[in-house]
Amino acid sequence: MRYVSWIITVPIILVIVLFALSNRETVTLALWPLPFVLDLPVYLAVLVPAAVGFVIGGSVAWASAARARKEVKRRRSQVAELSEEVVRARKRDRALKDREVREAEAERLAAANRAAASAAAREVVPVLDPSDTTAGEPATADNR
Protein backbone atom coordinates (compact mmCIF):
# COMPACT_ATOMS: atom_id res chain seq x y z
CA MET A 1 0.00 0.00 0.00
CA ARG A 2 2.90 2.31 0.75
CA TYR A 3 4.26 1.83 -2.77
CA VAL A 4 0.89 2.63 -4.35
CA SER A 5 0.77 5.82 -2.33
CA TRP A 6 4.20 6.83 -3.58
CA ILE A 7 3.33 5.89 -7.18
CA ILE A 8 0.39 8.30 -7.02
CA THR A 9 2.00 11.06 -4.92
CA VAL A 10 5.30 11.49 -6.79
CA PRO A 11 3.74 12.24 -10.22
CA ILE A 12 1.26 14.69 -8.66
CA ILE A 13 4.07 16.56 -6.91
CA LEU A 14 6.09 16.54 -10.12
CA VAL A 15 3.15 18.07 -12.06
CA ILE A 16 2.69 20.75 -9.37
CA VAL A 17 6.38 21.68 -9.43
CA LEU A 18 6.40 21.83 -13.24
CA PHE A 19 3.23 23.96 -13.18
CA ALA A 20 4.84 26.38 -10.70
CA LEU A 21 8.04 26.64 -12.76
CA SER A 22 6.13 27.18 -16.00
CA ASN A 23 3.74 29.83 -14.64
CA ARG A 24 5.84 32.42 -12.84
CA GLU A 25 4.23 35.41 -14.54
CA THR A 26 2.45 37.90 -12.30
CA VAL A 27 -1.31 38.22 -12.32
CA THR A 28 -3.38 40.96 -10.64
CA LEU A 29 -6.28 39.75 -8.52
CA ALA A 30 -9.01 42.20 -7.54
CA LEU A 31 -12.41 41.80 -5.95
CA TRP A 32 -14.60 44.49 -7.43
CA PRO A 33 -16.43 46.10 -4.54
CA LEU A 34 -13.35 45.98 -2.33
CA PRO A 35 -10.35 48.23 -2.88
CA PHE A 36 -7.84 45.38 -2.40
CA VAL A 37 -5.62 44.36 -5.29
CA LEU A 38 -3.09 41.50 -5.16
CA ASP A 39 -0.22 40.91 -7.55
CA LEU A 40 0.71 37.22 -7.36
CA PRO A 41 2.49 34.70 -9.55
CA VAL A 42 0.00 32.52 -11.44
CA TYR A 43 1.10 29.34 -9.69
CA LEU A 44 0.26 30.86 -6.26
CA ALA A 45 -3.09 32.12 -7.54
CA VAL A 46 -3.92 28.52 -8.55
CA LEU A 47 -2.15 26.32 -5.99
CA VAL A 48 -3.02 28.20 -2.78
CA PRO A 49 -6.81 28.00 -3.35
CA ALA A 50 -6.38 24.35 -4.38
CA ALA A 51 -4.46 23.59 -1.18
CA VAL A 52 -7.03 25.47 0.96
CA GLY A 53 -9.83 23.53 -0.75
CA PHE A 54 -7.99 20.27 -0.14
CA VAL A 55 -7.61 21.05 3.58
CA ILE A 56 -11.25 22.13 3.92
CA GLY A 57 -12.46 19.02 2.07
CA GLY A 58 -10.31 16.78 4.24
CA SER A 59 -11.66 18.46 7.38
CA VAL A 60 -15.26 17.99 6.24
CA ALA A 61 -14.60 14.32 5.42
CA TRP A 62 -12.92 13.77 8.79
CA ALA A 63 -15.80 15.45 10.63
CA SER A 64 -18.42 13.45 8.74
CA ALA A 65 -16.62 10.21 9.67
CA ALA A 66 -16.85 11.02 13.39
CA ARG A 67 -20.06 8.99 13.78
CA ALA A 68 -18.44 5.98 12.10
CA ARG A 69 -15.35 6.26 14.32
CA LYS A 70 -17.57 6.43 17.41
CA GLU A 71 -19.47 3.33 16.25
CA VAL A 72 -16.20 1.47 15.62
CA LYS A 73 -14.99 2.37 19.11
CA ARG A 74 -18.28 1.19 20.65
CA ARG A 75 -18.17 -2.09 18.75
CA ARG A 76 -14.54 -2.71 19.69
CA SER A 77 -15.41 -2.34 23.37
CA GLN A 78 -18.42 -4.61 22.83
CA VAL A 79 -16.19 -7.22 21.17
CA ALA A 80 -13.76 -6.99 24.10
CA GLU A 81 -16.60 -7.49 26.60
CA LEU A 82 -17.97 -10.45 24.65
CA SER A 83 -14.52 -11.99 24.39
CA GLU A 84 -14.13 -11.74 28.16
CA GLU A 85 -17.56 -13.30 28.58
CA VAL A 86 -16.55 -16.19 26.31
CA VAL A 87 -13.43 -16.76 28.39
CA ARG A 88 -15.49 -16.75 31.60
CA ALA A 89 -18.05 -19.14 30.07
CA ARG A 90 -15.29 -21.52 28.96
CA LYS A 91 -13.78 -21.48 32.45
CA ARG A 92 -17.22 -22.10 33.97
CA ASP A 93 -17.86 -24.93 31.50
CA ARG A 94 -14.47 -26.46 32.25
CA ALA A 95 -15.17 -26.24 36.00
CA LEU A 96 -18.58 -27.91 35.53
CA LYS A 97 -17.04 -30.70 33.47
CA ASP A 98 -14.32 -31.18 36.08
CA ARG A 99 -16.95 -31.33 38.83
CA GLU A 100 -19.02 -33.82 36.82
CA VAL A 101 -15.92 -35.98 36.31
CA ARG A 102 -15.11 -35.83 40.04
CA GLU A 103 -18.73 -36.67 40.94
CA ALA A 104 -18.77 -39.57 38.48
CA GLU A 105 -15.48 -40.84 39.90
CA ALA A 106 -16.82 -40.50 43.46
CA GLU A 107 -20.00 -42.34 42.47
CA ARG A 108 -17.95 -45.09 40.82
CA LEU A 109 -15.80 -45.45 43.95
CA ALA A 110 -18.90 -45.47 46.19
CA ALA A 111 -20.48 -48.19 44.03
CA ALA A 112 -17.27 -50.20 44.19
CA ASN A 113 -17.18 -49.77 47.99
CA ARG A 114 -20.84 -50.84 48.27
CA ALA A 115 -20.14 -53.87 46.09
CA ALA A 116 -17.13 -54.77 48.21
CA ALA A 117 -19.12 -54.34 51.42
CA SER A 118 -21.94 -56.45 50.03
CA ALA A 119 -19.51 -59.15 48.99
CA ALA A 120 -17.86 -59.02 52.39
CA ALA A 121 -21.24 -59.30 54.12
CA ARG A 122 -22.12 -62.36 52.06
CA GLU A 123 -18.85 -64.03 52.89
CA VAL A 124 -19.24 -66.34 55.91
CA VAL A 125 -16.64 -65.73 58.53
CA PRO A 126 -16.42 -68.45 61.20
CA VAL A 127 -16.82 -67.12 64.68
CA LEU A 128 -14.72 -68.89 67.24
CA ASP A 129 -16.26 -69.66 70.57
CA PRO A 130 -13.73 -69.22 73.37
CA SER A 131 -15.33 -72.09 75.34
CA ASP A 132 -14.83 -74.44 72.43
CA THR A 133 -11.91 -76.67 73.34
CA THR A 134 -11.64 -78.11 69.89
CA ALA A 135 -10.81 -74.77 68.31
CA GLY A 136 -7.77 -74.92 66.20
CA GLU A 137 -8.00 -78.71 65.77
CA PRO A 138 -9.00 -80.27 62.51
CA ALA A 139 -12.65 -81.06 62.27
CA THR A 140 -13.62 -84.67 62.85
CA ALA A 141 -16.93 -86.41 62.93
CA ASP A 142 -16.90 -86.21 66.74
CA ASN A 143 -16.37 -82.49 67.21
CA ARG A 144 -18.64 -81.22 64.49
Image: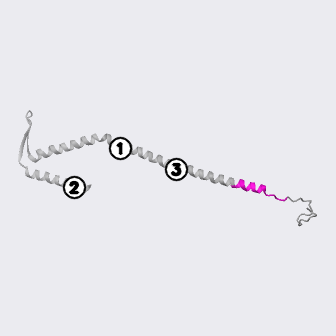
Residue beneath the point at 10% across and 47% down: 43
Q: Is residue 28 magenta?
A: no
Badge 3 amino acid: Lys
Question: Which residue in the protein does label 2 denote?
Answer: 6
Amino acid at circle 2? Trp
**Where is residue 126, by image quadrant?**
bottom right
Task: Please give left or right for residue 88 compared with residue 16 in the image.
Answer: right
Quadrant of the rendering where the C terminus is positioned: bottom right
Residue at image point 13% right, 53% down: 17
In the rendered structure, which disc, 2 or 1, sits on the residue that comes first in sequence? 2
Residues 142 and 113: in front is 142
Crowding near pointer 2: few (<14 within 10 Å), some, many (20+)? few
Q: Which residues are magenta?
A: 112-126
- Principal secondary structure, stretch drawn in magenta: helix
The answer to whether residue 90 is above or below residue 124 is above
Q: Residue tagged by mark 3?
A: 91
Front position in the image: 25 or 37: 25
Image coordinates of residue 49 in percent, x first then y, are 15, 43
Q: Does 66 sit left or right of 48 as displayed?
A: right
**Residue at image mark 1:** 72
Q: Real-space Cα distance between discs 3 and 1?
A: 29 Å
At 17% across and 45% down in the image, what residue appears?
51
The answer to whether the residues at label 2 and label 1 have Cβ atoms under 8 Å apart is no
Kind of residue indicated by mark 1? Val
Residue 111 is situated, as x and y percent measured from the top left of the image, at 69, 53
Residue depicted at 65% across the width and 54% down the height:
108
Q: Residue furthest top?
A: 33
